[in-house]
Amino acid sequence: MGGVVGLQCGAALTTRLHPAVGPAGVVTLRLCIAAVVLTALWRPGLRWDRTTFGIAAAAGTLLAVHHLSFYEAVDRLPLGAATTMEFLGPFAIALFGSRRATDLLWACLAAAGVVLLSHSGMPLDAAGLAFATLAGCCWGGYILVGKHLAERVPDGRGLALAVTWGALLSLPYGIAQAGIRLLDPGTLALAAAVAALSSVLPYTFHLEALRRVPPRVFGILTSLEPAVGALIGLVLLGQHLGVAQWAGVTAVALASIGATRAPSRAPKPATPDRPSGTPDDLTSRTPAE
């Protein structure tokens, strides 16, 4: 939830950055500043095996492509529609990771809520829909790869390396779109706040969450982003919602609560200890014992 709130607060701030540096410039500043902060905090180093490097690079690539495609989508679509398409990735993770009928119910309820949130009669730009769909695929992929990264690296060093790699990938696009405007002091100050809210804190929280919950649950919880975004938009940007959209907020919240309620499991019966000296116990010992 900390990651969700941070992402949406940062998204509210980016509305002031878009006119200055464009979507690619916003992504470049976000990732570059976040990379500097995370590297200074964790000092990841380079003494890792190839597999860990590969997982971190894959996570960073997915982050960079997700950010670039999502902000390009937001530049062409209403935010609710872009977020709805982005949710297709986490929804697929929740759907294919389901093991019970109720899991499917919560995933479908969350999807219905996101559709209600994005309800609009406006025609949607085809290129914007394509960018938003790509963002959803990348976000779903990041959930799976991020789970492996969180399990393989027990602290924030893997995240620091992934974000640094993503920043390097996004840098050429940001320079091509914004050029010298990326170095404007006012822009840098606002971008630093966006990077802290939208990258440093959320990605750290996401990895900590992925250490503790299955990707299915994480995928449904990320569906809270449109709902939280709607509330932040109301408070910070004065964006009002209709009845159908508030119904969507309620549906998504209920789905997230239901998905995180683990079923009670009966404890496994304890296996009685064998008394020492039984035949099995003796045959399992080495000659030295």
Image (tube, helix red, strand yellow):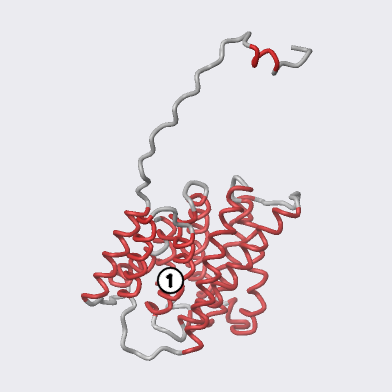
Residue 98 appears left or right of 250:
right
Residue at the (51%, 88%) spot, across then down:
127
Report the number of discs: 1
Residue furthest out toward the front: 279
Residue furthest out toward the left: 243
Q: On the rendered image, what quadrant is the N terminus found in?
A: bottom left
Q: Is residue 15 above or below residue 157?
A: below
Q: Position of residue 251 (x, y in %)?
A: 28, 65
Q: On the rendered image, what quadrant is the C terminus found in?
A: top right
Residue 203 appears left or right of 259:
right
Nearest the viewer among 163 and 142 is 142
Q: Position of residue 124 (x, y in %)?
A: 41, 88
Nearest the viewer among 286 and 24 is 286
Q: Is residue 280 above or below residue 218?
A: above
Nearest the viewer among 120 and 91 is 91
Residue furthest out toward the right: 287
Residue at the (60%, 84%) spot, across then down:
177
Nearest the viewer among 97 and 192 is 97
Q: Position of residue 9 (x, y in %)?
A: 40, 66
Q: Is residue 282 above or below residue 14?
A: above
**Label 1: which residue?**
11
Kindly indicate the quadrant of the structure image that contains residue 163: bottom right
Which amino acid type corresponds to the residue marked 1 in the rendered image? Answer: Ala
